[in-house]
Image: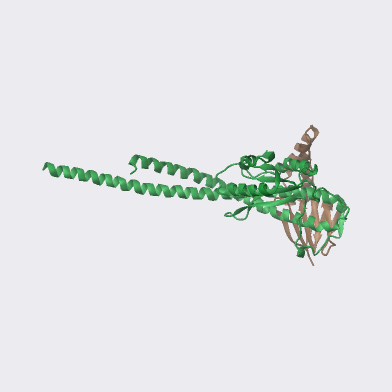
Amino acid sequence: MKLHLSIITPSQVIYQGEVDEVIIPTEEGIIGVLPEHTPLLSKLVPGELEIKTKGQSQHLAVTGGFIEVSNNQLTILADYAIHAQDINITKAEEAKKRAEKLMSEKVGDIDYAEIEKEFVRAIAELKVARHYKPK
Amino acid sequence: MASLMQLKRKIRTAGSISKATKAMQMIAASKLRHAQESALNARPYADHLTDVISRSMPKLENGFYHPYLKANDSNKRLLLVISPDKGLAGGLIANLIREMLKQTKTHSIVFVNIGKKIEKPIIRTKSELLASFLLGNSIPTFDIVEPVISIIDEQYLAGNVGAVDILYTKFSTVFTQTPVIKQILPFNQSLEKDRITDTIELVEPSIESLIPGLLRHFVQIVIYQSILESFASEQAARMAAMQSATDNANEMVTDFTLLYNKIRQEKITNEILDISSGAFQTQ
């Protein structure tokens, strides 16, 4: 029995396929979802997502969103998701620095939310890339 | 009969028109590829999000209240209309206006619009126009959604309007785009029966804390998706319109050239006749 996984972001479908296990960062802590999981709805928080198939692991960086399990189908609606091997470390570091600098200055509400989003994304990307990006 | 000079001028005009429309067609075609991709890629996300919310609705306890879920008493509706900024897009804008006018006949409406082309027609209906945004010439980014939502929130949460609809042009194929009206608020997406097979059992941390975030996200995504669809439709419509304009201009060039040659030949024949008859008489 396999679990059907789809990871969807507003700009594209990142992953679709049969998997053995998925490790997900949620608001309540890191959870592992196996096939035949109880129908579940939860909130995705920024961090690393691990997909296990046939003894192999894939890692992704994700930011916020929602996850849903029903009918042995796991749907991850993420604001942003990227495969570890696709992360550009230099770019992420730059984004982090830029966001840090902007956050230390005083800006309006909307701007601040945008910058914070970018900051969170850069941190998640860096964390995953440092651990798992093939050198 | 038109003189040779006049014909020559007409040929040149039609030729340069065909060049201009051809250029516009090519620009629209290159924009269309990206626009179509982003519109189609955003669809699964919007669909799934709607599904998730609909499936979690039965979990809510009866006493749960969220303004997005319940209509208020106002019988006014807010209509968000999305149109292109520029014309030359075939029947797309005319269709949009027709649909908009149909709505003003049946409901009392206040408007918010994105896209310059629909602004004047709205003002002409004498309805209230709360705000007008530009759509832009490249694929709209997500930032465009926030100011629109804050206006919607302001009106809807204060009870000035009882419902919020969106009118946009759905991108079906490169050749067909249709204006579509969709209700955003209050949330009333009903699931088809066969899809409610599995209600959610476990919700972490709690349904009451998740639903507000989900609903707000839903409104954002529906608006953004509609904007992307409208943008793709605009490019497709413009490409088709400019293609037929180019074809027509080229056809005119062919017709005029034919006529021009015919008249020229006739003139030469007449001149030869003149000369030869003159020569004949002097003999």
Provide the letter of the chain coloured green. B
Please name the color used to draw chain A: brown
Question: Residue B70 versus residue A107: which sits nearer the camera?
Answer: B70
Say whether residue B34 is visible.
no
Dividing the picture into quadrants, the one containing residue B117 is top right
Question: Residue B164 vs residue B115: left or right?
Answer: right
Picture layout, residue B33 above or below residue A113: below
For the rendered model, the colour scheme is by chain
Dividing the picture into quadrants, the one containing residue B7 is top left
Which residue sits furthest front?
A: B105
Which residue sits furthest top?
A: A106
* Residue B13 x %, y %: 43, 41
Say whether residue A95 is visible.
yes
Numbered disc total: 0
* Residue B112 x %, y %: 69, 42
* Residue B183 x %, y %: 72, 51
Image quadrant where one finds the N terminus of chain A: bottom right
Question: Residue B5 versus residue B180: which sits nearer the camera?
Answer: B180
Which residue sits furthest bottom?
A: A1
* Residue B230 x %, y %: 64, 48
Question: Residue B270 vs residue A4: left or right?
Answer: left
